[in-house]
Image (cartoon, grey):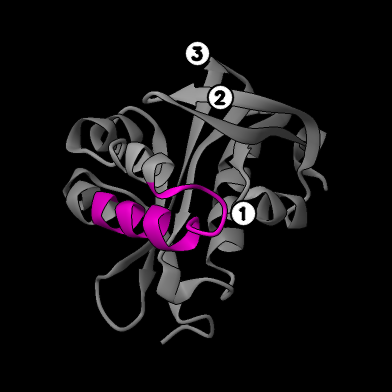
Amino acid sequence: MTKTGFSIRRAVETDIGPIMEMKRRAIRESAKDFYTHEELEAWVESANPTRGREIVVDNEAFVAIADDGNRIIGLTNLEYLQAPDTTQGEIGQLYVDPDFGGRGVARALLAAALELAISHGSRQLQATASRRSEPVFAACGYEQVRRQMKEFNGHTYDSAIMMRQLPVGGND
């Protein structure tokens, strides 16, 4: 058992179903104080196998696995805004199982993505943070650049564009 109660590894295609289940639960339970029921359900529609495949297969995704088994308790993925140019990375997803909130899962996932981005020569990471995830990104060194109203599935969501500058040459 690890000190944290979980470990981080790269996501694989067979993780897609459990990832989408965890994502739906995280949206419905963790974000319920920030969005209406209708907004949450529209957001949950993005937790489908097609989107899961894009996250895991087409990007560089990490999952957190609980030490008590193979339960996926978190997800993040690294995308590049102008692929194949890797200087500008983006955190495309960040979700944590509600039962594991506040235990460092999001921080560990973001650290794994940060390490990979630095190894690819990225100079900054961007994230579009929901009202729920904004404090998490801020605690991990991201700064709000601007607010935006993002249209998705017939609803408008208040979010923040957040940025973190990365060390050049791997020095923090």
- Please tell me which residue is depicted at 16% across the width and 49% down the height of the picture: 14
The quarter of the picture where residue 103 lies is: bottom right
Q: Earlier in the sequence, mark 2 or mark 1?
A: 1
Q: Which residues are magenta?
A: 20-37
Camera-near label (3 vs 2) is 2
Cα separation between marks 2 and 1: 26 Å
Task: Judge whether residue 137 can be spotted in this image.
Answer: yes
Give the side of residue 167 with respect to residue 87, left or right. Answer: right
Residue at label 1? 111
- Please tell me which residue is depicted at 78% across the width and 35% down the height of the picture: 169
Q: Position of residue 170 (x, y in %)?
A: 75, 41
Q: Earlier in the sequence, mark 3 or mark 1?
A: 3
Label 1 amino acid?
Ala
Q: Is residue 32 magenta?
A: yes
Residue nearer the viewer, 160 or 137? 160
Q: Classify 52 as above or below 63.
A: above
Residue at label 2? 150
Which mark, by number, is residue 84? 3
